Structure formats: structure tokens, C-alpha cells
Image (spheres, rainbow, N blue to C red):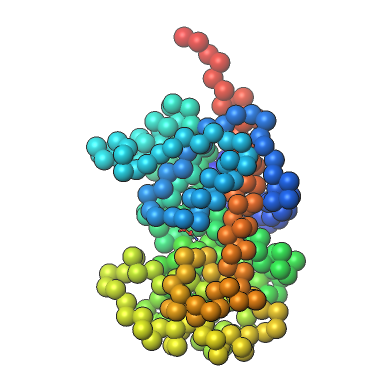
Amino acid sequence: MKHFISVDSLSKEEIFRLLHQAQKLQKNPERMKEKFFVSNLFFEPSTRTKMSFIIAQKKLGLDIVEFHPDSSSLLKGETLYDTAKTLEAIGVQLLVIRHQADNWFSDLQQLNIPVINAGAGKAEHPTQCMSDLLTIYQEFGSFQGLNIVIAGDIKHSRVAHSNAKALTRLGAQVYFSAAPEFRAEELDIPYVSMDEAVEIADVLMLLRVQHERHMNKMETSNYLNRFGLTKEREKKMKEKAIIMHPAPVNRGVEIDSDLVECGRSRIFKQMENGVGIRMAIMLTILEEWGKKDENINYERK
Ligand code: CP
């Protein structure tokens, strides 16, 4: 694994290896023996992903090279590729990137250093997907036969896209539940109403209404009752069913505020797991990349 851009590129064995490694690292954090310089390039806001990458990097003993788009030469018109190539040239050995474009990675194919996708527009959020897989795996020990309902603003959600594909591949039965304007018909996933969702779900994964990606701000005063998880609906969930949400949460919109920390909520567990899984991903990538002789240039001119 050189880059980590989509869970699609991992075999099932690689997914399970990372889940197991993350659990080991959560118990016994491992510092890397070699020194690596890493940089986090976030062109969209982030709390969880960016901070958990930083914690994971510090636990692994990596050297973080600060990068702030607002004070970089991007403001002079430098492209993402030239920015990344510059960081590579001056010695950064791993880039973690979040960008608003769905396919920003296609511009970076010629980089020699590994790149991790920390969020690509509406398309992919593979490290969130891996945190979610870890949370479900810890809870049920398998994905086979689970009913997983992903509910909310599917159309604008990179988490929905990454998770639907990965969970289906791992043997879960995935359903979507969404307001008509939030459906993503290009994905071949059956839709259920929220009333049906609470009856069938082993995992109910709620998604934020992504106002910042909408052309017009949506009126949400009646959203909770029509499409969200109310306290009345939560009472109809299966005894062992869990609630997930990648967060940030719009309390009182897609979920009643009182349910965010209820007994079946794993929302903060997902965040905790984000550190372990990001450690596992970076450790795997850097160990593989660091072993390759061609990455060390001994030649003197
Ligand atoms: N879940 C997630 O990506 O959160 P942040 O946008 O805060 O990183």
C-alpha cells in the first residue's frame, strides 16, 4: 500500500489486518524507529480527522511539519500539485490531505511520497470509513449479515459513499434512508423510511445535513420528525442495535440531542477509534515506503 485514497483499493485481508493492528496500537502505542517528516494539508475545516491524525502522528513519534493554506504560496496561485511536490522536495515523507474536490488525488499521481486521503469532496472519506468499520467490528465481531442503515444527507456525504461500498463488500446488507433531495440514485442501494430503518437496523448510521454543500440553505425545523432519529423512534430499535454518526452532529436535526450520548450511541467511540486506525494506516504505509531503497537518494553530483 503506497497511498491510501480509497478503501476500494484494499483487499478484505488488508482491511482486517488494519483493524487488528489498530486494536493492538490502541492498547500499546508503538513509536517508529526511523524518523519521518509528515505534513497535514487541510483545505476544508476539520476537528476530528485533523486532530486525530496529529495525535496518531505524535504517538508514532513522527515529526509534524506545519502547513497552513491561508499563509502558504497557494495564495500566490501555486497549485496543489506544486505545493505537494515542494513539500516532497524539501523532505516531507508523507502527506495527509483533505480537499473540497472529489478527485483531487488525480493531480498528484506523479508524487514519489505516499498520500493519505483525509476527505475528498463528496466522494470518499476512507479513514473515517476505517474508524467506522473498527467500531462495528468491535461491537459485532463480523460484518456478515448485519443490517446497516445509513440515513441522512447521502447525496453530499463522502462517508456514505465510502461506507456503503466497503460494508457491502464485507457482507453487510446496506440500506439508505433519506429525504428525496438527499438521495444518491447513482449508488445501487435500496432505500427505507426512517420508521422502517429503526425496526431493521443493527447499525443506524446517521449523517449530518451538509448545509455548506447546498445551493440554498435547507429549512430544518421539521427535519427531525420527518427524517431523523427521535426519542420515540429510538425506542423501536432492536435491543442490541447501535447508533453511529461520523460527526459533527447537528443536534436536534438528524438526531435528538438527548440520544447523542445515550447507551446505544457509539459516536464518541468512533472518534476514539479514529486515532488507532490512523496510527495503523500511517505505520503500514511508512514501514512499506521506508523499506524501498529507491526512496533514499545517495547519489552525489
Ligand atoms: N468526521 C469528520 O470528518 O469530522 P471532521 O470534519 O471534524 O474532521
Q: Quadrant of residue 224?
A: bottom left
Residue 122, quarter of picture: bottom left
In which quadrant will I find the N terminus? top right
Write down the quadrant of residue 204 in the picture: bottom right
Q: Residue at x 27, y 73 (%)?
A: 216
Residue 286: x and y in percent read: 61, 37
Residue 153: percent from the left, percent from the top?
A: 43, 73
Nearest to the observer: residue 14 or residue 135: 135
Residue depicted at x 37% and y 36%: 83
Residue furthest left in the image: 76
Front in this rendered view, residue 159 or 190: 159
**Is the residue 119 above or below the residue 243 in the image?**
above
Q: Is residue 4 above or below residue 185?
A: above
- Left or right of residue 17, residue 69 in this image: left
Residue 23 lies, with reference to residue 182, above or below; the image says above
| Residue 112 seen in the current view | no
The picture places residue 243, in percent across and down from the top left corner, at 60, 75
Q: Using the image as rendered, state which of residue 119 and residue 240 is in the foreground.
A: 240
How many numbered discs sit on the rendered protein? 0
Question: Is 96 displayed left or right of 284 in the figure?
Answer: left
Q: Residue at x 48, y 58 (%)?
A: 124
Task: Name the foreground residue: 245 vs 171.
Answer: 245
Q: Answer yes or no: is residue 38 visible.
A: yes
Kindly give the residue lying farthest to the top in the view shown.
301
Vertical comparison of 119 with 240: above or below? above
At horizontal 58% and vertical 36% (from top left) the residue drawn is: 62
Coordinates of residue 69 in the picture (x, y in percent)? 34, 43
